[in-house]
Each structure stands twice: as structure tokens, then as C-alpha cells.
Amino acid sequence: MGYGSDEQLLLRAYQVEGASLSGEHVHWKLFRVDRLGNVEPNPAPSSAPRDGYKRDDKAMKGGIIAQI
């Protein structure tokens, strides 16, 4: 989680199901926190970090708040 270039709060997360404008329902996604809605935790055990996870996300141009 961190800030984008316009100081918007961003979250990089692995989406495991649900609707997606990109059409990719299972993949790493970058979310603007102010646009999130109807988010539910998944009770399944996590296999974190998932394949494709990268520390120091370059999208967080305004700084990183937290990362695995």
C-alpha cells in the first residue's frame, strides 16, 4: 500500500475472484482505495507471497506505507 504520483492512496493486491474491468479476475491488481467498494475478506488460507509479488512497487511514486 502506498501513494501514487497524485497522492492517491493505492493498494496492490491479488484478486482471486469477482468482477474486473480488465476482464482478468485472478491476477495482481492495482486499486485506488477511494474507488474500492463491496470488498470482502477471503477466509481461505493465504499462500503469501503469491507468485509475481514484487517488493518496492514502482507504482507507489509518492511512497510506500506497508508491504509484505
Image (cartoon, rainbow, N blue to C red):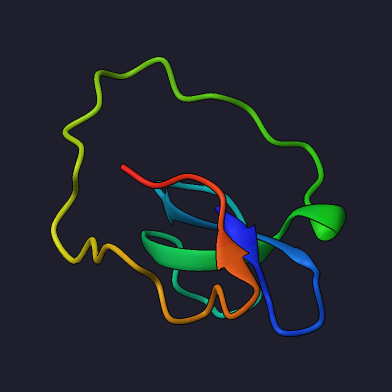
For the question of whether residue 20 can be seen, the reply is no
Say left or right for 24 vs 39: left
> Where is 44 relative to 53, above or below?
above
The quadrant in which residue 53 appears is: bottom left
Q: Which of the image's four quarters has the C terminus?
A: top left
Q: Is residue 65 visible to us here?
A: yes
Q: Nearer the viewer, residue 36 or 59?
A: 59
10 left or right of 56 in image? right
User: Front-most of 7 and 31?
Assistant: 7
Q: Residue at x 80, y 68 (%)?
A: 8
Percent from the top left, x then y, of residue 43? 41, 15
Q: Quadrant of residue 58?
A: bottom left
Q: Position of residue 24 (x, y in %)?
A: 44, 72
Q: Residue at x 19, y 44 (%)?
A: 49
Q: How many marks?
A: 0
Vertical order, 39 against 30 (above or below): above
Q: Quadrant of residue 52?
A: bottom left
Q: Residue at x 69, y 36 (%)?
A: 39
Judged left or right of residue 62, residue 27 is left
Height in image: 9 above or below 7?
above
Identity of the residue drawn at 84% across and 59% down: 35
Foreground pick, 47 / 63: 63
Is 24 left, or right, of 62 in this rendering? Answer: left
Toward the front, the furthest residue is 63
